[in-house]
Amino acid sequence: MSLRLLIADDHTLLRAGIRSLLERTFPDIDVQEASDGTEMLAMAAATPPDIALVDITMPGLNGIDAAQRLRDSCPDCKVVMLSMHQDDMQVVRAMRAGAHGYLLKDAAVAELGLALDAVRRGQVYLSRDLSAAVRDMVVTGQPAEPDPLARLSPRQREVLQLIAEGQGTKEIAYRLGLSAKTVETHRKDLMARLDIHDVAGLTRFAVRHGLTTVDT
């Protein structure tokens, strides 16, 4: 049975390595590559994949928010998150967004094939190296502490990520198809909701909670 797979990761060499591995492992596979969440959504709209292998930390639109949008636009697509993060908040956040699997980037090569096979069969796959406590939290849907990002709408998270990545009001407005006034309103709402009153503080908050690494 053929498999259409979409890899979304902003590191070209990593995508190439995963693609090469998959093409050796699965004889009948069609692999596409996207460099960020926005490109992934556009490619999935044109050619819906069976499985999307999605990095969490990507510029512009992070993997978790991209996965949530993909779930809405392509409900038959399965998502496996690929990440370096193994803290409970990130894992639960990813599964709440509609991911069917969560695989750590330092997992054994063979585990990638196991994850894709499991998700393909409709099962949920969690990386073997995740702790039992994190696995239990995924089952209950409750992290150990409240999720600070849950206070924000998807659009507010998107604006926050772009602010943290150094984008100005006009750049954000152009990228998101919004007016500059609307972007400024989002910025003011973010500061009020989070009780943070400067861009540096918003940036620290975004990095601390995994929206971006600000090293893109």
Image (spheres, rainbow, N blue to C red):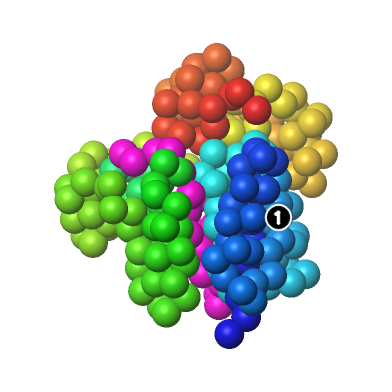
Q: How many marks?
A: 1
The x and y percentages for residue 119 are 43, 71
> Residue 190, relative to residue 195: is it above or below?
below
The x and y percentages for residue 192 are 48, 28
User: Which amino acid is tagged 1?
Assistant: Glu
> Residue 173, relative to residue 18: is it above or below?
above
In the image, residue 72 lies in the stretch drawn in magenta: yes
Q: Which residue is mark 1?
A: 33
The x and y percentages for residue 153 are 51, 47
Q: Is residue 36 left or right of residue 118?
A: right
What is the secondary structure assignment of the residue under circle 1?
A: strand
Q: Is residue 128 left or right of residue 31?
A: left
Residue 41 visible in the displayed image: no
Quadrant where the C terminus sits is top right
Over which residues does the magenta segment extend? 64-87
Looking at the image, the residue that sits furthest to the bottom is: 1
